Image: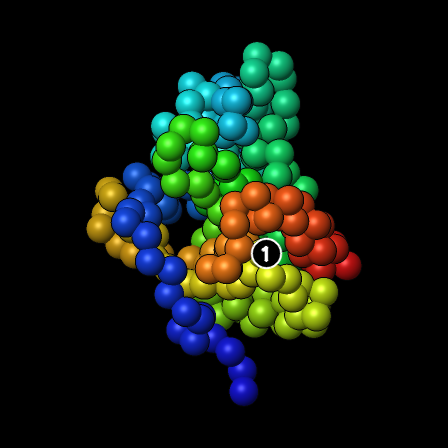
Amino acid sequence: MTVTWADLPVLSRGKNEMGDVAGFVARWESGAEGRARVAVQTSGFGNRNRDGSPDRPSAVAVVPGEGVALDGEPAGWTGALEDGVRELVPAVVRALDCVTYSSCQGHDYRALGRPSRTREVCLLARTPEEADRLTRESVGRLHAASAALDSPYVRVGLLREDLLCASTGSRWQCLSLLFDRPAGAGWTEYFAHLDASTATVVGLFDA
């Protein structure tokens, strides 16, 4: 049986929205050469956004070809990616020839008294056909390494969701490569094993 985007479990979150999705895709496909350098700051918790704050719910949407000033120093577009996904995102983009619109390395916020966050990479499908292709190719890779990814501390999976375009009201099909924390695992164990699981997935997409 061939798996399609519609067969994936749904990722439910309070809000998944971008101002101009079509414009973002156009920037991605053009390489956005010549745009002004985007300033990104790093927080003490590893967040990367305009002001380096763990309170900002989303980061700057940067595409390949855009310049980044990371903590005041020039960097390529991957400079906007948080350290925990800095190898993973380009590996996924290269392997699947896809657009990614968001990512998170996961953040341990227990010291702040707020919910911690898991690691993920979010893929944006430009067409329904691409959504199904991304699903097939990603599921195939994850299935091939299911034994290596079997962990009581980190569960790697693929989920589907919609991205709302605020300017038009349209909805775009997306996929989330999620490094989830199983119910029986504590945050300490999760973060201790997260990079190893990520390295395994990077190898799947770089193979």
Image position of 34 with respect to 90: above or below = above
Residue 8 in picture, x, y percent from top left: 44, 71
Outermost residue toward the top in this view: 72
Give whichever of 57, 187 is nearer the camera. 187
Image position of 133 with respect to 207: above or below = below
> Which quadrant, please, contains the C terminus?
bottom right
Left/right of residue 195 with respect to residue 99 in the rendered view? right
| Corner quadrant of residue 137 | bottom right
**Total marks placed:** 1
Look at 38% across and 32% down and name the residue there: 113
Residue 95 in picture, x, y percent from top left: 67, 56
Look at 45% across and 43% down and name the residue there: 117
Outermost residue toward the bottom in this view: 1
Query: From where the camera sits, is residue 26 visible?
Result: no
Its colouring scheme is rainbow
Q: Residues within 10 Å of mark 1 (few under 14, many from 20)?
A: many
- Kind of residue sitting beneath label 1: Tyr
| Corner quadrant of residue 205 | bottom right
> Which quadrant, please, contains the N terminus?
bottom right
Query: From where the camera sits, is residue 183 visible?
Result: yes
Look at 57% across and 43% down and name the residue there: 188
Residue 100 in picture, x, y percent from top left: 51, 47
Q: What residue is disc 1 on? A: 153
Give whichever of 70, 120 is nearer the camera. 120
Q: Secondary structure at mark 1?
A: loop
Look at 50% across and 22% down and name the residue there: 43
Residue 96 in picture, x, y percent from top left: 61, 58
